[in-house]
């Protein structure tokens, strides 16, 4: 039996497990505001030198540390937050597949849980 819909704070009815259109738009506005204040990737250190170092690291560590799938992302275990020394410390890097970088790792960082390997 399907679960019943819920009433959003705006008063509209939304299907169970789905977000109301007002919630989706609110998230978009909040994300746009955040992106407007965020420095560009280049300003955060992701330059051509990073691309070369990343490619080399993936050559030596080709598998996701979580699931063993082919890795496509070099992730900073502890977020560098502009710290160049931490940014370039290869001991702070781990290979992740896109799925684990974009889901599990981001959820972990948002929750402010310890920044160990995923």
Image: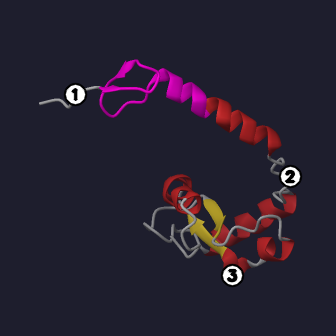
* Whether residue 44 is situated above or below residue 26 in the rendered picture: below
From which residue to which does the magenta span run? Answer: 6-27
The residue depicted at 77 percent of the width and 68 percent of the height is 53
Q: Nearer the viewer, residue 12 or 66?
A: 12
CA gap between label 3 and label 1 equals 49 Å
Secondary structure category for the residue under label 3? helix
> Looking at the image, is mark 3 or mark 1 earlier in the sequence?
1
The residue depicted at 83 percent of the width and 65 percent of the height is 82
- Residue extending farthest to the top is 12
Residue 32: % across, % down: 71, 34
Q: Which residue is mark 3?
A: 91
How many C-alpha atoms fall within 10 Å of the one at disc 1: few (<14), some, or many (≥20)? few
Residue 46: % across, % down: 81, 57
- Please give the count of numbered marks on the rendered protein: 3
CA gap between label 3 and label 2 equals 22 Å
| Residue 5 lies within the magenta run | no
Residue 24: % across, % down: 53, 28
Secondary structure category for the residue under label 2? loop
The residue depicted at 80 percent of the width and 63 percent of the height is 50
Secondary structure category for the residue under label 1? loop
Q: Nearer the viewer, residue 25 or 103?
A: 25
Tag of residue 4? 1
């Amino acid at each position: 039996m399907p679960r019943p819909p819920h009433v959003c704070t705006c008063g509209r009815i939304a299907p169970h497990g789905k977000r109301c259109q007002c919630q989706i738009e609110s998230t978009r506005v909040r994300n746009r505001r955040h992106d407007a204040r965020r420095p560009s990737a280049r300003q955060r250190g992701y330059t051509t030198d990073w691309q070369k170092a990343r490619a080399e690291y993936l050559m030596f560590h080709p598998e996701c540390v979580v699931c063993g799938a082919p890795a496509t992302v070099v992730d900073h275990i502890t977020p560098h937050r502009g710290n160049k020394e931490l940014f370039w410390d290869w001991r702070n890097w781990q290979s992740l597949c896109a799925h684990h970088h974009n889901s599990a790792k981001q959820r972990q960082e948002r929750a402010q849980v310890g920044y160990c390997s995923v």
